[in-house]
Amino acid sequence: MTVLIKGGTVVNADRSFAADVLCVDGRIETVAQKLDAPKGAKVVDAGGRFVMPGGIDPHTHMQLPFMGTVASDDFYSGTAAGLAGGTTMIIDFVIPNPQQNIMEAYRQWREWAQKSVADYTFHVAITWWDETVAKDMETLVRDHGVNSFKHFMAYKGAIMADDEILVNSFSKALELGAIVTVHAENGELVYRLQQKIFDMGIRGPEGHPLSRPPEVEGEAANRAIRIAEVLGVPIYVVHVSSRQSLESITRARNEGQRVFGEVLAGHLLIDDSVYRNKDFESAAAHVMSPPFRPAEHQDALWRGLQSGNLQTTATDHCCFCAEQKAAGKEDFRLIPNGTAGIENRMEVLWHHGVNTGRMTMNEFVQVTSTNAAQIFNLFPRKGSISAGADADIVVWDPDRSKTISAKTHFQNIDFNIFEGMTVKGCASHTISRGKVVYADGKLDVERGAGRYVDRPPFASYYSALKRQAQLKKPSAVKR
Ligand code: URP
Ligand code: ZN
Ligand code: ZN
């Protein structure tokens, strides 16, 4: 299939320039001015619009089995919704149950993901530890293109990783040339506070943020970062929602540590007043962890993004409908944690980021695509409009306005946390693997068209192997 995107302005992370983009068989073949359409090519008129790398959402949970239910957007509907918003790739999570064989969980998620309509890859969570887990981490890095391992420092009694697991897993990741990622909340404190608040008679969703204050996040972020510092492994903190957590990241980066931070579109734009809504359905629909914060944290997060101390934006897309959220009607601790957003991430960030002057178009591309590609070793195959890259592209219309609503979104959920928000600037066309899959409000996707993307480890794995091999040589021993 051949597609020519004509007359647009290419916006990459580093610069913008007028060019046509020719895509052949899933790849970008040529980026140059005044290209002629080859015979049979589909031509997309991008006049007056921006041609940008498709978004990468580095944090999603499609059809996640969680808190007694399963997330309602599966890999088909969730990746399709992403394409409608200009996101052409997700990094989802394999989350083994405690004691579940890691490879078995990995194979399960690979099978579920086969219905994806956009490209995908996986972080793998380490939820327990023994020597078989260490071996499986090795297999995943060596043979399955996994270069990141996730650790939930919360969810005690379920998937929480304590310090012993963190130290074991971080050490192994370093040896393998992988990056570690953490959900930073002190699970012990959350557990204790949940009990206390419940015992005080607070049963509704307003109890959720009270049981997970910013300090609980700040403590965990700082602990994980310092453990990573001692061990010398790069670390990525997911869904940074508080000033405290951002301060730990900023401090460590200023000290020269390799630390990255991700912020969710929701945490930038929504505050904790949503939990005080008397309507249970609406308040429960916002229950996610870490929770939405008082407005001062949003200001800090925007500054973190602008200063480069936070590098990526994500959604933590994890949908639960009203009937699923109702499991916690009498007890906020039982409300399935998660909110949606994959379809809206790019447009809300453009509207509140670029249109307000908080970031340039190139910075928008950095935080929605290129930085994630670089941090997780997908660049320049992803995150770049350049010859040889995958043809994952969004044509962006800066003049088009829309009002976000659950009534019109593609996401398989009955609620939208950005309901009623009018945004100016959104995707007019999305090209995935060289095919136009979204145009002017309509999806044209093929079940299973998305591909699993390998992510090679970072250099240290190979240098460690080389060093080991050299040590075994007699000449090396003599020296
Ligand atoms: O509330 C959330 N974030 N649900 C999904 C699991 C996680 O913690 O990322
Ligand atoms: Zn999380
Ligand atoms: Zn998550």
Image (cartoon, rainbow, N blue to C red):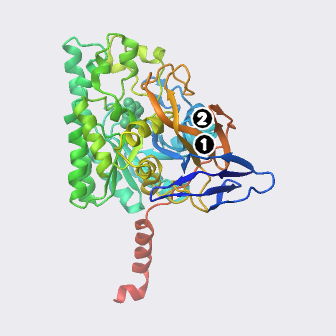
Rendered image quadrant of residue 174? bottom left
Residue 345 seen from this side: yes
Instruction: Label 2: state its secondary structure.
Output: helix
In the image, is residue 465 above or below residue 188? below
Question: Which residue is depicted at the point 67% across and 50% down?
Answer: 434
Front residue of 156/282: it is 282
Question: Which residue is depicted at the point 24% across and 25% down?
Answer: 211
Name the amino acid type tagged 2. Ala
Q: Residues within 10 Å of mark 1 (few under 14, many from 20)?
A: many
Q: Which residue is mark 2?
A: 80
Name the amino acid type tagged 1. Ala
**Residue 349 on image: x %, y %:** 42, 39
Residue 118: assigned label: 1
Q: Earlier in the sequence, mark 1 or mark 2?
A: 2
**Residue 313 on image: x %, y %:** 40, 43
Residue 174: assigned label: none
**Residue 113 on image: x %, y %:** 59, 39
